[in-house]
Amino acid sequence: MSTWVFAEELNGALNPGALELVTKARTFGDVNVFYLGSGSDEAFAALGEYGATAVHQLDTGDTLPSAAAATALGSLIGSDGGTLVLFGGGTTDRDVAGRLAAQLNLPVLANALDVSVDGSVTAVSEILGGTLSVTTASTNDGPTLVTTRPKAFAAEPSGGGAPSVTAVDMPDVGRAGTATVTERHVEASEGPDLESATVVVTGGRGLGGEEKFAMMDELAGLLGGAVGGTRAVVDAGWVPYSYQIGQTGKTVKPSVYIACGVSGAMQHVVGMKGSSTIIAINKDPDAPIFGVADLGIVGDVHSVVPQLVEALKARG
């Protein structure tokens, strides 16, 4: 089995999700990485440390990257069977996977939570808000393309050495190559990244308003954590989309997840149920969030959280 991992740069650095994919991919043998971005010695060394043996790098500059990436990757993997290509769940990952599938006239196994190889490639995914698990086996004669959910695999270094690095020529993609990136916006944020934070404090509609998120910021700051939000509060405009956790937002797996005024809708739970310890604060004793919580506090979040903040401040 020839295994490939799609990796891209985010804000000038390697997307850490690629290390999760490389960790999984190395269980199937040697790992080739298709790297989209300008690259750096640090990024290539990290890929090697987690198990990559070869890196093929394409730098598209200001050209919209997906069409070129799909064409270049398709040329590298060919059309024969026995090849597995793992993609993350990001926008570019899904775009490139879809374009590559169209080029090769192949399906994509989407949103996988686990992947195994035993003669054929098998992917496990969840549907209906995580209430049903589905196992799908690839039976096509060509490469198998799989997109994965964020945090599906744990990133673990293997102690590998530096991989070989080969520059990939920019392919001719016709009119698709005339689309360019004219501006990049990086949203300002403070504290740890939401997806990599060890503590996440999430506010739901039960907070009552945008101004109440100051409590979440203060609690997260005292715990060295990041602040998240439910889809309801994002739709209400209380916090930006980058805060959203759930099926249509980010997937997090912190050591401690504190849900404040969060009802526990299934579309939210699928994005945080992998947390090591879940603490829920809600005044409704029948709130679904208590069904997944390790520790539940039945009480008004506007009373409980300030008391928690004061207790943490008292501890210094």
Image (cartoon, grey):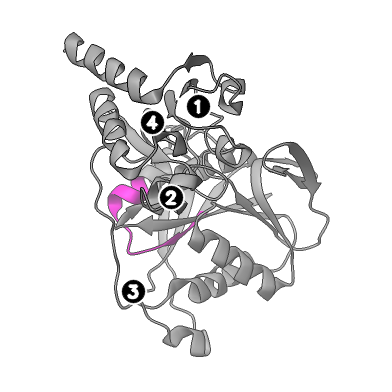
- Distance CA(mark 4)–CA(mark 2): 16 Å
Q: Residue at x 81, y 60 (%)?
A: 140
Residue interval drawn in magenta? 33-45
> Can you tell which of label 4 and label 2 is closer to the viewer?
2
Return the residue at label 2. 234
Label 3 packing within 10 angstroms: few (<14), some (14-19), many (20+): few
Q: Please name the amino acid that badge 1 sits on.
A: Ser
Residue 49 vs residue 147, the one in the foreground: 147
**Residue displayed at 25% across by 12% down:** 311
Q: Residue 65 or 264: which is nearer the viewer?
A: 264
Q: Position of residue 313 (x, y in %)?
A: 19, 16
Circle 1 sits on which residue?
275
Question: Residue 160's x, y, as percent?
Answer: 43, 37
Q: Residue furthest top?
A: 315
Calculate the distance from the C-alpha at mark 3 to the C-alpha at mark 2: 33 Å
Earlier-in-chain disc, 4 versus 2: 4
- The foreground one among 244 and 31 is 244
Quarter the C terminus occupies: top left
Dot 3 and dot 2 residues touching (CB under 8 Å): no
Whether 90 is drawn above or below 67: the answer is above
* CA separation in Å, label 4 and label 1: 9 Å
Q: Secondary structure at mark 2?
A: helix
Mark nearer the viewer, 3 or 4: 4
Q: Earlier in the sequence, mark 3 or mark 2?
A: 3
| N-term-proximal mark, 1 vs 3 | 3
- Residue 197 on the magenta span: no
| Badge 3 or badge 4: first in the primary sequence | 3
In front of the other: label 1 or label 3? 1
Q: Residue at x 53, y 43 (%)?
A: 246
156 to 184, vertically: above or below: above
Q: Which residue is mark 4?
A: 200
In the image, is 11 to the left or to the right of 77? left
